[in-house]
Amino acid sequence: MKRDIHPEYREVVFQDMSTDFSFMSRSTVATDETITWQDGKEYPLVKVEVSSRSHPFFTGKQRVVQSGGQVDRFRKRFGMTRGTSAG
């Protein structure tokens, strides 16, 4: 294995922004934010939108996603109307 070509593999805290649930795992993800964990040490922080605490597959509840505006902008941009398909 070549030296100094691999990213740093370290403990990282992932925080679900919708439920404020946090968990620690090992990762190579790059981040500038840090958080003080339960053990009093500081770790890199990665904020995520979905985790096992908020995903409908794990919770059994459907979450409303505000994507209607994105769909309308897509249709406007590409001249599509409801009921027509690009093809």
Image: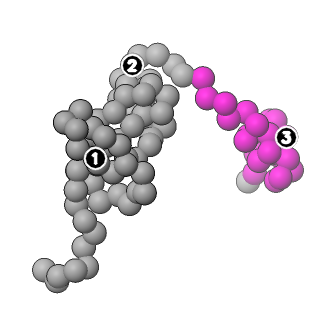
* 8 with respect to 70 (left or right): left
Distance from label 1 to label 2 (Cα)? Answer: 30 Å
Are the residues tagged 1 and 3 within 8 Å (C-beta)?
no
Distance from label 2 to label 3 (Cα)? Answer: 34 Å
Per the image, label 1 sits on a secondary structure element best described as strand
Measuring from the top left, give residue 15's x and y in whole percent. 39, 37
Q: Quadrant of residue 73?
A: top right
The three-letter code of the residue at mark 2 reads Thr
Measuring from the top left, give residue 30's x and y in whole percent. 38, 60
- Residue picked out by circle 2: 59
Check disc 2: other Cα within 10 Å, few if <14, some if 14-19, many if 20+. few
Q: Quadrant of residue 21?
A: top left
Residue 19 located within the stretch drawn in magenta: no
Give the residues drawn in magenta, as a range: 64-86
**Dot label at residue 81:** 3
Up the image or down, 60 lies above or below 73; here it is above
Seen at 17% across and 82% down, the residue is 3
- Mark 1 or 3: the one toward you: 1
Measuring from the top left, give residue 80's x and y in whole percent. 83, 46
Check disc 3: other Cα within 10 Å, few if <14, some if 14-19, many if 20+. few
